[in-house]
Amino acid sequence: VHGGVVISLERLRRVRGLEPELWRMNVEAGVNTADVSRLARENGLIFPPDPGASEQSHIGGNVATNAGGPHAFKYGPTGAWVSGLEAVLAPGELATVGSATRKDASGYDLRGLLVGSEGTLGILTAVQLRLAPAPALALPLVAFIADLSSAQRALLEILGSGLQPAALDFLDAAAFALAAGSFPGKPPGEFTRSSERDGGGVVLLIELDGSPGEVDEQLAELDQVLGPYEESPLQRPAPSALWRWRDGLNGAIASVRGGKVSEDICVPPERLEEAIHAVYLLGAELSLPTCVWGHAGDGILHATFMVDVSSPAELERGLQASERSLALALSLGGSISGEHGVGYVKRTYLGADWDGATVAAHRHVKEALDPKGLLNPGKKDPLAGSPPAE
Ligand SMILES: Cc1cc2nc3c(=O)[nH]c(=O)nc-3n(C[C@H](O)[C@H](O)[C@H](O)COP(=O)(O)OP(=O)(O)OC[C@H]3O[C@@H](n4cnc5c(N)ncnc54)[C@H](O)[C@@H]3O)c2cc1C
């Protein structure tokens, strides 16, 4: 954006330490995220964060964006699994922040500050990760719900029941229809119908985990909660088939018209229905085919507008839809990003809902750690330019 140099960390690939009996791993920033998960699994453990692009992304990038995924509902995003960091801080000194200790209440939480800082405060070179014992059983389930308002009520009942599924994701029927051909189960006959005000029905993707007894108990309770809302009994796709299918969704949706504009906005979970209606209104107003999917339990919705990338007018409308969906999230008491971060594209909306003291504190942190403004300049900078008028 402003010129400068690109620093590639892809050759920092060493696993510095793996201590399965202590549930921890120390890896360099360029280690592939999927390799971190694989190594944990091979040792009877899990590294729960599961962002969609895990084969393409690096653990350093995941920590820098505090990436999340379906299992963040129970286990939290990447930052929840980072106990220590090694980073290069301005003016170019190696710093070790945190350690392998499981708790640290001593200094300011510099670890927490660097997590999610998107390369604007320092360059992460290695990460000390926590791992967890793998649950004996993980049971993926799919529920088909006829309409959005029933799905909203079902979600609130699941949350209110105290059940804590490992994952609680959703797709509306419009999104589901685009990948229905490869769905590892059988949707009820009428399901892919659409509605004018939203995407029609809702598919919940749920995973329960624990010991076989715990999973049985949760399943009985979930069945009871969801029973009145479901189109057909809960389906049980083969383990791993569901998430493999879910990982392919992004590409399937993008391929419909050649491109898509999709924002990872986040709202309080009780406002998902409202948010989805508003996203469809936006799509209708801008004449863009729309679908919505995301992490229901965390209130994250990928507000998605499909565009023909060869049409400049359509791309322009896609950008408008994207900006207006950020404003929408803020108007519902939500956030412009629930998992992907802010970067450059969303900068004009960062801080639009903060008070002056918060904006100032955010800027002071940047000035203290990067006094010359050399690290990813212009990014994650609150109120960098005014948001376009509604
Ligand atoms: C198909 C697809 C699916 C995705 N699904 C998800 C998802 O489910 N959840 C989610 O959260 N995100 C998702 N993303 C967004 C993105 O892939 C993730 O946020 C990922 O964590 C970024 O990691 P990366 O290694 O690719 O980082 P990059 O894209 O290379 O960098 C991201 C930012 O972090 C900074 N950065 C990278 N490495 C470091 C470092 N070592 N030190 C300091 N700063 C650094 C960069 O400067 C940049 O600002 C998806 C992206 C794609 C393309």
Image (cartoon, rainbow, N blue to C red):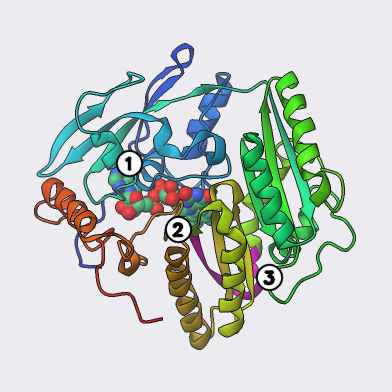
Mark 1 or mark 3: whose residue is earlier in sequence = 1
In the rendered image of this protein, does residue 362 appear above or below residue 26? below
Mark 2 or mark 1: whose residue is earlier in sequence = 1
Residue type, numbered disc 1: Val
Kindly identify the residue that appears in the image at 31 percent across and 33 percent down: 126
Bin the neighbour count of mark 1 within 10 Å (Cα to Cα): few under 14, some 14-19, many 20 and up: many
Q: Is mark 2 within 8 Å of ligand 1?
A: no
Q: Is residue 364 left or right of residue 117?
A: left
Q: Which residues are magenta?
A: 253-264
Kindly identify the residue that appears in the image at 44 percent across and 54 percent down: 340
126 inside magenta stretch = no
The CA distance from mark 2 to mark 1 is 20 Å
Residue type, numbered disc 3: Asp
The CA distance from mark 3 to mark 2 is 20 Å
Image quarter (top left, top right, bottom left or bottom right) of the N terminus = bottom left
In the rendered image of this protein, does residue 209 appear above or below residue 311? above
Image location of residue 285, percent across then percent down: 57, 84
Residue picked out by circle 2: 334
The CA distance from mark 1 to mark 3 is 36 Å
Image location of residue 162, percent across then percent down: 63, 34
Q: Which mark is residue 198?
A: 3
Image location of residue 71, percent across then percent down: 57, 39
